[in-house]
Image (tube, helix red, strand yellow):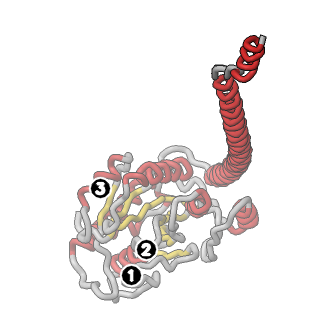
Amino acid sequence: MDIDDYKRIINNFSFDRCKRGNQGFNRVLIQLFGLLGHGKSSFINTCKYVWEDGEYRNWAKAYGSDGGLTTERITYKLTGNITLVDNRGYKTLDSYETGEIFAQLGNLLPLGKDVDWSKGFALVDRIVKAEKEIKTSDFIIPVFVHSVKRIIPSDEIDELKNLIETAKKLTEVYPIVVLTHKTSGNLTNTEATFRNMGVERIFSFENYTTEDHFKTRGRHEEVLKFLHEVIKDVQFRVEQPRDPVREMKDRRQFVMNYVHNREKSIQMENIERQKAMERALLEKKLEQEKKALEEKAMREKRLWDEELQRQREEFNRRRAVDQARFDAEENAAQMPKPDKPKKILGIFKKKNKH
């Protein structure tokens, strides 16, 4: 199939020509989502450039750094039945940004308006307010855009896999993965990472840019093959009975349940965190009391030991004094008593006179 064949099939696509008719659908929304600065806007420029086959223009306001400037859901029409949507990218996969991603993918937020990362139940309020502005006639094709420049850390793989799986449950379509900057990193390893997550369709591109928009057959064919694959997927999905109104309600309920469970989980985490803090404070208090008691016991023991030592020294001193006195008395008692010679001599003299 050559470029003209691809273009003819894409351009002639209409829900009215599907086996079951339009079933209430009239437009395909190719919903791009992913990290900030991974080339979503540049990919839109590339698709527009290939499809219109005219002068290159920076339709999506992409810049060389691809720094993630998109803050609203902006639409870019390709054909009368196919529209690209540049959704706001996320910085991290925390529960708040993830909720916003699902609200965008589910087409629950207005097109052409800023997307605010809101906390609490504010997202639910925004979804409810937007009900009248949202069309149920849009058929959603989720497309995850990732730059090959960024190696996916091993600790993020499960989170990313969960995001893609949840996007599938939400839209009832398994996301297509578009890899950008394919010559600026390890394309083989990146493709393998996504295939290990269960991704079936992966397309790799080197986007046209303001600096490099020299037309090549290869780039044009890659883009048209991607768009042709989107059409084939839509046709396959609508072969079964579909109800766009019910599907919109299901997506709305899905995201609302997600927000409810998220807030419940955060509340439980806060409670557990508070309990942990209270336990830590109690343990610290008990440790301080234990330390105080130990210090008191040590002081009392030291005082007792000092008093005991004083008493021992006093006892030994007194014993030494008593022993010295006893020894002196003992020595005095053992000394011989002197005779009385003068008295005896006087007796002898009296006898001689007689």
Q: Which residue is mark 1?
A: 65
Q: Quick check: 195 left or right of 307?
A: left
For the residues labelled 2 and 1, the Cα–Cα distance comes to: 7 Å
Q: Which residue is mark 2?
A: 37
Between 335 and 20, the residue placed more toward the observer is 335
For the residues labelled 3 and 2, the Cα–Cα distance comes to: 19 Å
Place of residue 113 in the rendered image (x, y in percent of width and height, measured from the top left):
63, 76
Image quarter in which the N terminus is found: bottom left
Which type of secondary structure does the marked residue at label 1 adopt?
A: loop
Q: Quick check: 348 left or right of 189?
A: right
Which type of secondary structure does the marked residue at label 2 adopt?
A: loop
Residue 304 appears in which quarter of the rendering? top right
Q: Are marks 2 and 1 in contact (CB under 8 Å)?
A: yes
Q: Quick check: 103 left or right of 351?
A: left
Between 16 and 192, the residue placed more toward the observer is 192
Indicate whether 234 appears above or below 282: below
Residue located at (67% from left, 37% from top):
313
Q: Quick check: 170 left or right of 157?
A: right
For the residues labelled 3 and 1, the Cα–Cα distance comes to: 23 Å
Place of residue 109 in the rendered image (x, y in percent of width and height, measured from the top left):
64, 66
Residue located at (43% from left, 74% from top):
37
Which type of secondary structure does the marked residue at label 3 adopt?
A: helix
Place of residue 307 in the rendered image (x, y in percent of width and height, measured from the top left):
73, 39
Q: Looking at the image, is mark 3 or mark 1 nearer the viewer? A: 1
Q: Which residue is mark 3?
A: 191
Residue located at (31% from left, 79% from top):
208
Q: How many marks?
A: 3
Indicate whether 293 appears above or below 191: above
User: Badge 2, how many Cα within 10 Å: few under 14, some, many 20+?
Assistant: many
N-terminal-most mark, 2 or 1: 2
Residue located at (30% from left, 88% from top):
211
